[in-house]
Image (cartoon, helix red, strand yellow):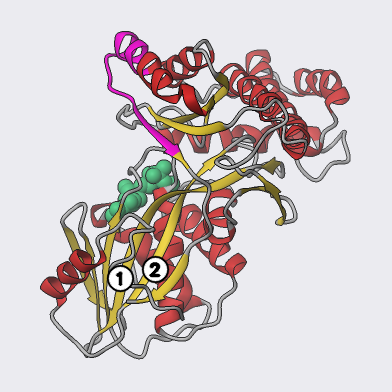
């Protein structure tokens, strides 16, 4: 395990201050202090298809969640979320439980419970501190960062051998079974496996991935321009995301149950675009409720179109043609808005204002949607004017302040001694 200098500024944390917060909470000790850092992620294109066997193209960005852990001399496991000023503790010999009232602790309890289920035995209690610069509940996957950082920290502390893919699958299981969100594998997989200066082309049906070069800062792209990846946070308070997400998943399952009787495909994303009109006919014939059939068809069309857009976007990215690459963002947003119906007035306002601002090559919502963040590729010299124009228009239309983060792509989660 590499040692992290307390003076390190690379991750955006004051490690001297974090260590003293940890010691103020849990006291001094000779036990090794371990620091686990996990990045946020954005999905560049391919949303809501990671649970339909599609291709997705996420990358990790330079905003981190940090977990400090250290063994203690008791049988107690304690968590402290510094950003929320919330604490939780329980005996490692008792079952780790879910309870809505436990809040953030549920994610960690879920990871701990499933690690135990897979044979892990903690020989002592331990203390945990969480601190993060990833906005919570904004679609940049603070929850996946929390899960992966915790799993890797526990693995290091107790010398468990767990692969990155196992860690990602465990985190996904926590979201699906412990938290009840029927999400796909993308978030945990990219947080656990990202490589800087690349986007990850992940085939969610096989978990095979390929790293596509995406050097935003120092390249001379085909059209001679440098672009910046700008994340636009709508700052819209979250509501109903989980239930709407699960509703989409159910709709896709229903559509697939009907279509697989006619088409020999392993998942919705494997339908060929030229078979869409036949799929529409099959759904209309199978459903007594024709409105429902129309809704199911729109969900199916999104899966097929979005999966195709990912492939086309990747072809442009391989050519280092970022302008064309970003044009697929805008097409993808339309599909998420009109067919999958997971956008919202705020994300639509950010995207529509972004694409009409000079220097923006394309924009789309990213992640689960409804609220949260959108992304844009913007010519680097035009970023300040872009932020002002989009921020002002958004304020006028939605009466909310947007936040903008210009991001670099970074490596996956990592564990250090401190
Ligand atoms: P997203 O993953 O898009 O940020 P989620 O709703 O999936 O949003 O996950 C947010 C949840 O993750 C929070 O409600 C909290 O329970 C947990 N979480 C995220 N960041 C932190 C943090 N810094 N400290 C404690 N818990 C956190
Ligand atoms: Mg999440």
| Residue 160 appears left or right of 55 | left
Q: Are marks 2 and 1 in contact (CB under 8 Å)?
A: yes
Decide which of 417, 383 is in the foreground and name it: 383
Task: Give, as a single range, the part of the protein colored magenta.
Answer: 391-406
Quadrant position of residue 279: top right
Decide which of 382, 36 is in the foreground and name it: 382
Residue 33 within the magenta-colored segment of the rendering: no
On screen, residue 368 above or below 225: below
Quadrant position of residue 226: top right
* Residue 348 % position (x, y): 47, 17
Which numbered dot is residue 68? Answer: 1
Residue 397 within the magenta-colored segment of the rendering: yes
**Residue neighbourhood size for the residue with mark 1, other residues' Cα within 10 Å, grouped as few (<14), some (14–19), many (≥20):** many
Q: Look at the image and tell me whether residue 113 can be seen.
A: no
* Residue 209 % position (x, y): 71, 54
- If the image is split into quadrants, where does the C terminus sit? bottom left
**Residue neighbourhood size for the residue with mark 2, other residues' Cα within 10 Å, grouped as few (<14), some (14–19), many (≥20):** many
Classify mark 1: helix, strand or loop.
strand
3D distance between C-alphas at marks 2 and 1: 6 Å
* Residue 52 % position (x, y): 68, 41
Q: Look at the image and tell me whether residue 117 can be seen.
A: yes
Q: Residue at x 15, y 70 (%)?
A: 20
Quadrant position of residue 377: top right
| Mark 1 sits near ligand 1, with its Cβ under 8 Å away | no
Residue under numbered circle 2: 36
Classify mark 2: helix, strand or loop.
strand
Decide which of 285, 44 is in the foreground and name it: 44
Q: Residue at x 13, y 71 (%)?
A: 25
């Amino acid at each position: 395990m590499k040692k992290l200098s307390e003076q390190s500024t690379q991750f955006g944390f004051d490690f001297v201050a974090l260590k003293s917060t940890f010691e103020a909470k849990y006291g001094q000790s000779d036990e090794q202090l371990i620091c686990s850092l996990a990045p946020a992620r954005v999905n560049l294109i391919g949303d809501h298809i990671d649970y339909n066997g599609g291709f997705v193209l996420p990358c990790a960005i330079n905003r981190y969640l940090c977990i400090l852990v250290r063994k203690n001399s008791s049988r107690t496991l304690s968590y402290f979320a510094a950003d929320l000023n919330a604490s939780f503790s329980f005996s490692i010999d008792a079952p780790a439980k879910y309870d809505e009232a436990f809040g953030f602790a549920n994610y960690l309890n879920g990871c701990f419970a499933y690690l135990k289920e897979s044979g892990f035995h903690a020989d002592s209690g331990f203390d945990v501190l969480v601190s993060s610069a990833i906005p919570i509940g904004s679609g940049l996957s603070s929850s996946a960062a929390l899960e992966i950082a915790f799993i890797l920290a526990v693995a290091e502390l107790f010398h468990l051998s767990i692969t990155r893919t196992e860690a990602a699958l465990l985190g996904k299981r926590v979201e699906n079974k412990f938290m009840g969100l029927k999400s796909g594998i993308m978030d945990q997989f990219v947080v656990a496996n990202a490589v800087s200066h690349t986007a990850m082309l992940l085939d969610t049906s096989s978990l095979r991935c390929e790293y596509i070069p995406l050097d935003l800062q120092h390249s001379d792209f085909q059209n001679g321009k440098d672009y910046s990846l700008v994340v636009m946070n709508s700052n819209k308070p979250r509501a109903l995301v989980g239930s709407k997400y699960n509703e989409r998943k159910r709709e896709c399952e229903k559509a697939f149950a009907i279509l697989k009787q006619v088409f020999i495909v392993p998942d919705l994303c494997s339908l060929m675009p030229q078979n869409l009109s036949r799929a529409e006919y099959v759904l209309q014939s199978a459903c007594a409720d024709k409105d429902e059939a129309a809704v199911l068809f729109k969900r199916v069309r999104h899966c097929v179109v979005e999966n195709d857009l990912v492939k086309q976007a990747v072809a442009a990215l391989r050519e280092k043609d970022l302008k064309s690459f970003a044009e697929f963002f805008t097409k993808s947003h339309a599909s998420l808005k009109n067919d999958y119906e997971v956008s919202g007035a705020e994300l639509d306002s950010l995207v529509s204002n972004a694409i009409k601002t000079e220097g923006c090559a394309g924009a789309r919502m990213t992640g689960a949607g409804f609220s949260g963040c959108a992304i844009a590729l913007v010519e680097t010299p035009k970023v300040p004017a872009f932020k002002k124009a989009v921020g002002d228009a958004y304020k006028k239309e939605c009466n909310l302040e947007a936040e903008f983060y210009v991001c670099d792509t970074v490596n996956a989660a990592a564990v250090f001694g401190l």
